[in-house]
Image (tube, helix red, strand yellow):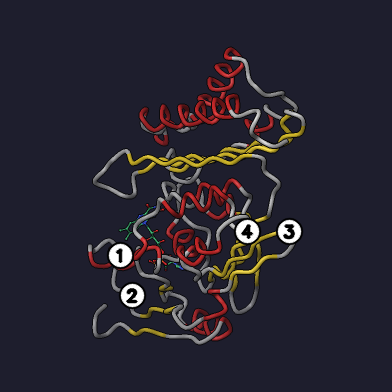
Amino acid sequence: MSDDSIILRPQNIHELLVMANEYPLAVIYAGGTSLFPQISSGLKEIPSHTISLEHVQEMNHISRTEKYLEIGARANLEKIYSIGPPVIPDTLLKAIRETASPSIRNISSIGGIICSGKGSSSILAPLYLFDTLLEIRSLSRSRWIPISRFISEKGSIQLREKEVLTRIRIPFGEWNYQNYRKSLYNSKSRDESLSFCACIRLSKNIILDLRFAFGGVSKRPFRNREFEILFLGKKIPFRTEELNALISELQFYLSPKDEKEKPIAYQTRCALEYCRYFFEEINLGIHHIPG
Ligand SMILES: Cc1cc2nc3c(=O)[nH]c(=O)nc-3n(C[C@H](O)[C@H](O)[C@H](O)COP(=O)(O)OP(=O)(O)OC[C@H]3O[C@@H](n4cnc5c(N)ncnc54)[C@H](O)[C@@H]3O)c2cc1C
């Protein structure tokens, strides 16, 4: 940062919101792992005011109720990972383990990942999968919004001036099986990865709920409830023809209407393959998956 740049250090959420209100153009600084590289490479201007979340302890809290897990936006990935199963869903644990190195995970916050709004982030797809809710606060109001509405189709985040992401709420679900996979399609860039996650709830081999989310196939993670609903009430194992038909259907849903948004063929192919592996694993493991 330059000598003229002012760093503000609120001690609690109230002070943070007062400062965000007073300096609407100030940049929030959580772990800085995304912010600093952008500033040093010239992608972002040096802000005149930066608000550091370092001392806002309330934003580090992780708690649970019967229905959901609640994570403060400043909680770092290692802290979330250390809580482990069953509180942290399997897919999220795997996604964290495959994100950066332990030292980067020690400073990268979950709120920073969400507010970076990168559709290829390996953490965002699991958050989409579980219908995560975000608490957005300003001095004058507070709102909860689904993560699916937070990042626009074009990849920009829906945070207004003076607003801060304060908490992340992940509803618990009773899943019989979850799966997460990630591949880097450009080994030179950590931003270019494809992630896949899925979870399934069964009763006597009948699908009661099935969800898929993909990161890296468009500007924001991809999830389509219309496609997921096609599976409800179906019995596993799937026959090969049935599986092929479902994969073709997914190909249709994965193709965005806007030609410019069309994902690179490789990513789509990879996403379809991961989906196929998931079903094959379910078919193979049918006797071991409870439900
Ligand atoms: C070496 C390396 C490897 C990486 N590998 C991966 C990977 O494999 N997968 C992956 O998904 N990511 C990866 N990342 C990205 C990393 O996860 C993000 O840089 C990081 O999570 C951002 O968190 P942060 O706390 O450092 O955010 P910051 O850099 O502090 O902030 C990021 C943005 O969010 C805003 N912001 C932060 N918190 C809030 C808040 N509470 N309210 C409002 N705005 C806020 C900031 O103003 C800024 O615009 C990697 C990063 C590095 C450096």
First in sequence, mark 1 or 4: give its number. Answer: 1
Task: Give the crowd class for mark 3: few <14, some 14-19, many >=20 residues within 10 Å.
Answer: few
Q: Disc 3 or 2, which lies upstream in sequence? A: 2
Quick one: SS at disc 4?
loop
Q: Residue furthest front?
A: 288
Is residue 18 rendered to the left or right of residue 142? left
Q: Secondary structure at mark 1?
A: loop
Mark 1 and mark 3 in contact? Answer it, CB < 8 Å: no
* Residue that badge 2 annotates: 47
Q: Element under label 2?
A: loop
Q: Amino acid at mark 4?
A: Val
Q: Residue furthest top?
A: 241
- The answer to which of marks 4 and 2 sits earlier in the sequence is 2
Who comes first in sequence, dot 4 or dot 3? 3
Depth check: give the residue in front, 125 or 39. 125
Q: Quadrant of the N terminus?
A: bottom left
Separation of disc 3 and disc 2 at Cα?
Answer: 40 Å
